[in-house]
Image (cartoon, coloured by chain):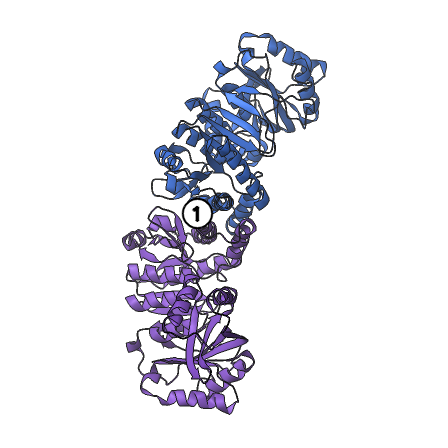
Chain colours: A blue, B purple
Amino acid sequence: MNLIVKKYGGTSVGTTERIENVASRIIEDIKRGEVPIVVVSAMSGETNRLVSLAEKIDPQYRGPAYDMLVASGEQVSVALLAIALQKRGYKPQPLLAYQLGIHTDKIYSKARIQKIDGQKLIQFCQKGLIPIVAGFQGIDDEDNITTLGRGGSDTTAVALAAAIQAESCEIYTDVAAVCTADPRLVPQAKELYKVSFEEMMEMAGLGSKVLHIRCVEIAAKYGIRIHLRSTFESREGTWIVPEGEIMENPLVTAVTHDANTYVFTLHPTPEGTSFLADLFKKLAARGVIVDIITQSQTEKGQRLAFSVTKEDVPLAKQVLKETLPSTVNIETMEGMAKVSVVGMGMRNHPGVAATFFQILAQEDIPVQLVTTSEIKISAVISSQHLEKAAQKLSAAFSLVGGV
Amino acid sequence: MNLIVKKYGGTSVGTTERIENVASRIIEDIKRGEVPIVVVSAMSGETNRLVSLAEKIDPQYRGPAYDMLVASGEQVSVALLAIALQKRGYKPQPLLAYQLGIHTDKIYSKARIQKIDGQKLIQFCQKGLIPIVAGFQGIDDEDNITTLGRGGSDTTAVALAAAIQAESCEIYTDVAAVCTADPRLVPQAKELYKVSFEEMMEMAGLGSKVLHIRCVEIAAKYGIRIHLRSTFESREGTWIVPEGEIMENPLVTAVTHDANTYVFTLHPTPEGTSFLADLFKKLAARGVIVDIITQSQTEKGQRLAFSVTKEDVPLAKQVLKETLPSTVNIETMEGMAKVSVVGMGMRNHPGVAATFFQILAQEDIPVQLVTTSEIKISAVISSQHLEKAAQKLSAAFSLVGGV
């Protein structure tokens, strides 16, 4: 059987008309000989509606009841898509997490999948049924509903594909492809036809919103090829594949950005080796995710700078206030952004870093923090320079031009 | 343990404020020493919203996807009430049908409960958790969600009470009690403190909307005392109990009505004994529920009359058209209503029927159809006479006056 997992996101099932459109599209796929397993998100706006009900009662609460609440959104989409397929004379099998045994840990709202009964899914297909699976949800060892956090339905889709060793996993969304840069920032950005798992993981981690990093991690681990494409067009989009499938790597594959960055600078930091470990342990304990860290020596002592996302700023400030002696000067920089270049080709070409900094220097853009890996370079700069930086970097690395 | 099942209906949980109010009320009960098991309906309006989504895609469809869709409404209420209890420092256990093993047959949208794992429910209570159970839903033998049809959450509540042999089952609603007549029709109607199961079943079957007949049937079968009361007042409402608990029965306990009646008269009907059986078999096969049937001999042959509810009229007309030869004259009467008196005390007092018809005759109200049982008399009359009939019958049987 040519098993293909097909995931339709919130905008793809945002209205009953769109759900009917998805049903028609699935039927075209079946007529072409594919055996689809469909995963759906909640109708766009529905999860927010449910969250706002919970927040009216208790904005703080997270736990099993919260996950049960928000999981109802996917249940509605599953049922409606099944009704649309039934109307067209096909046999859907609507499925929730408990029916498929999508087992997760107990970390509510951010649960991780541990086991899926792939055999059951294959049996439905063998009977000629079209499984329609609720994304985003799982069950814990006590049969409570759990949810998988941001990008959860993509994660469900890739995990199902892994459990049944599907041919590939199609992620249908409202963008047609992964681009060399965000087209809102770099209008000349090109669509990418193939991207390696490693590059896509870096891009997701560096601000690309197209796919969540966890779904790409699972795809990479199990070698599931992801095909990201538009619900509203029939042409192919971007394939996310093992590196070996990409014949020749460009130096840089994409420029990504994250406009949601905030920098703290501490100066002078207390003497002694334990200070850094202490501080970052406390930040982690409060759930603050620290991104880039740099340290430098000045005549007045050590200067420490680190970046966090905007949402974590209030918590980070609180931790700093509780931890630091009053001798430490805390400087904060708002309105910062992170711009990065990513590419497998960088591994053997140290010249990329030189070009990167040269471009920023030519444009008089001050760099506050820098971090690099084998396949990426990131710099924190002022948001006001972001657009120019993204455009100049794209041009310098040949990422713009006709499709 | 003083186990009491408490069911809160759609208006009782219609807003987050009302859900918080229900949480407070449950906590008061706990402080009084009760061990509550809570059943909730969907927030009022929510089931209609879900149904209208399904109907946009396919107004005809009924099946597992439809039941999965509408069952999501109860899931939302369960989760929100659990969040409200958690906020107040209590430990709720939100539960859906699959978690409790509420097993039903496979008649989607009208499923009947076959088995409930009462032991699991008791274990939650023993651990100090407050079970919050989704009403209206079950699962079939393949783990698909089913729903129980009209009054489904009441049925869930009584069935849970039976499964754990609870002390009683409280049904919280937006009316304060069962009355001797519908107060909109008979403003002087009195509240009833105790009603027998048998009377309540007749009343539900004869148009009283307060409790669905199936929930009362289960209560009667397992001897579960139902306490129907208001969510918005703390006083007691009406107890529905075994007959033995009621010391003295009034002749007539209540006047009920159903304004939703339609009468067909066929004349002359075809000769031969098989005609009646054939006709009613065909009507039943199409799902038309025939209420009262009467037959009389005229000089021109047999005259048959029967009543159906308004919703079934188009289907009934179609069956008659397909079944009857053109020699049969079909007369239809719209705008009819059924008025009934119900009471255990009628069994030994044949005079009730005489009074009943005398009152209608005094008021010049023509009676079209009549049916009786040991504890009820029903007459189909014109809707325009309904209010007067209900008021005069209530007065004649001492069912009006101060509470």
The x and y percentages for residue A157 are 46, 32
The x and y percentages for residue A240 are 52, 22
- Please rate how many residues cluster around mark 1, counting C-alpha atoms within 10 Å: few if below 14, some from 14 to 19, many from 20: many
Q: Is residue A149 visible?
A: no
Q: Name the one closer to the observer, A5 or A358.
A: A5
- What residue lies at 27% left-to-right and 53% top-to-bottom? B119
Q: Name the one closer to the observer, B160 or A283.
A: B160
> On the rendered structure, is A49 left or right of B139?
right
- What residue lies at 37% left-to-right and 76% top-to-bottom? B199
The x and y percentages for residue A321 are 54, 33
User: Count of labels shown?
Assistant: 1
Chain letter for mark 1, please: A
Q: Quadrant of residue A295?
A: top right
**Extreme-right residue of the structure:** A363
* Quadrant location of the N terminus of chain A in the rendered image: top left
* Quadrant location of the C terminus of chain A in the rendered image: top right
Q: Quadrant of residue B254?
A: bottom left
> On the rendered structure, is B212 left or right of A267?
left
Q: Which residue is mark 1?
A: A65
> Can you say whether B347 is above or below A277 in the image?
below
The x and y percentages for residue A26 are 51, 36
Q: Name the one closer to the observer, A70 or A230.
A: A230
- What residue lies at 49% left-to-right and 30% top-to-bottom? A283
